[in-house]
Image (spheres, rainbow, N blue to C red):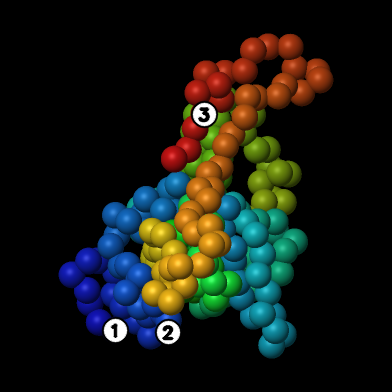
């Protein structure tokens, strides 16, 4: 491994084969990208074949907590020693890049890839704290404004812990990379911005009260 001045070490698994100049190892950037999202994709190998599952996650310092069900295979496999080798990815799409040639079309994005060995959280206090972190990461302030899980619900819920040790970010920004020979073509070239929007809260049919302030003011970058 090569320790970088930016933060996380660059390893063979965190060094991209293409567009290496887009790779980032800065801890502040990695943390910001993880904190901005809440849906990741967890990859692992099951019976010799790759499996990738969407999941909720939350960051706690240099550790990620990943939500799951006790009946799911990755959670069961992570319960043994030394744990389950995984790869978790988070991606933000910022724009569709349209070039004059089909070949140079691209996407502006910011992504994080985390490699490591996940373990199942079995300590009751750590598990309860992790579940609160997961709820509050998705909707800040919600954990204190809902009924905590009871014993049966806790037994049906599992949490994976994955340390941020082998991590990289990758960023693509800017406009299209048109070939000089294509600049005179009549096709439009540029970027179509992409952004996520959270709408106004929609109450359940049997909910008569107003939406709490943390929902009406909810917004993400």
Q: Is residue 9 visible in this depiction of the protein? A: yes
Nearest the eye: 134 or 202: 202
Residue 190, image x and y in percent?
47, 56
> Which numbered circle lies on residue 95?
none
Mark 1, secondary structure of its residue? loop
- Identify the residue shown where x is 74% and y is 12%: 208
**Crowdedness of circle 3 by 10 Å Cα count: few (<14), some, many (20+)?**
some
Mark 3–mark 2 Cα distance, whole angstroms, equals 38 Å
- Measured along the vertical axis of the image, is residue 173 above or below residue 16? above
- In what quadrant of the picture does the C terminus appear? top left
Residue picked out by circle 3: 218
- In what quadrant of the picture does the N terminus appear? bottom left
Mark 2, secondary structure of its residue? loop
Residue 175, image x and y in percent?
41, 60
Mark in the foreground, 3 or 2: 2
Whether residue 189 sits left or right of residue 41 in the image: it is: left
- Identify the residue shown where x is 37% and y is 50%: 32
Farthest residue in the bottom direction?
48
Nearest the eye: 161 or 202: 202
Residue 124, image x and y in percent?
54, 49
**Crowdedness of circle 1 by 10 Å Cα count: few (<14), some, many (20+)?**
few
Mark in the foreground, 3 or 1: 3
Residue picked out by circle 1: 1
Nearest the eye: 121 or 87: 87
- Identify the residue shown where x is 75% and y is 61%: 71
Residue 186, image x and y in percent?
54, 62
- Measured along the vertical axis of the image, is residue 169 above or below residue 209? below
Residue picked out by circle 2: 17
The total number of labels drawn is 3
Mark 3–mark 1 Cα distance, whole angstroms, equals 40 Å
């Amino acid at each position: 491994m090569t320790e970088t001045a930016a933060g996380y070490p660059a390893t063979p698994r965190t060094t991209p084969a293409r567009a290496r100049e887009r790779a980032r190892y800065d801890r502040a950037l990695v943390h910001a990208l993880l904190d901005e999202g809440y849906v990741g994709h967890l990859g692992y190998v099951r019976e010799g074949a790759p499996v990738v599952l969407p999941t909720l996650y939350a960051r706690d310092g240099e550790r990620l907590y990943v939500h799951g069900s006790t009946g799911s295979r990755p959670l069961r496999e992570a319960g043994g020693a030394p744990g389950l080798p995984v790869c978790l990815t988070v991606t933000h799409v910022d724009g569709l890049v349209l070039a004059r040639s089909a070949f140079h079309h691209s996407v502006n994005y910011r992504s994080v890839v985390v490699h490591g060995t996940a373990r199942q959280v079995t300590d009751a206090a750590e598990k309860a704290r992790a579940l609160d972190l997961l709820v509050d990461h998705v909707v800040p302030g919600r954990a204190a404004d809902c009924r905590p899980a009871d014993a049966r619900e806790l037994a049906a819920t599992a949490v994976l812990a994955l340390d941020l040790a082998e991590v990289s970010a990758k960023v693509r920004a800017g406009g299209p990379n048109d070939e000089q020979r294509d600049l005179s073509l009549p096709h439009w070239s540029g970027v179509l911005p992409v952004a996520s929007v959270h709408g106004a809260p929609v109450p359940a049919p049997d909910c008569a009260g107003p939406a709490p302030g943390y929902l009406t003011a909810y917004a993400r970058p």
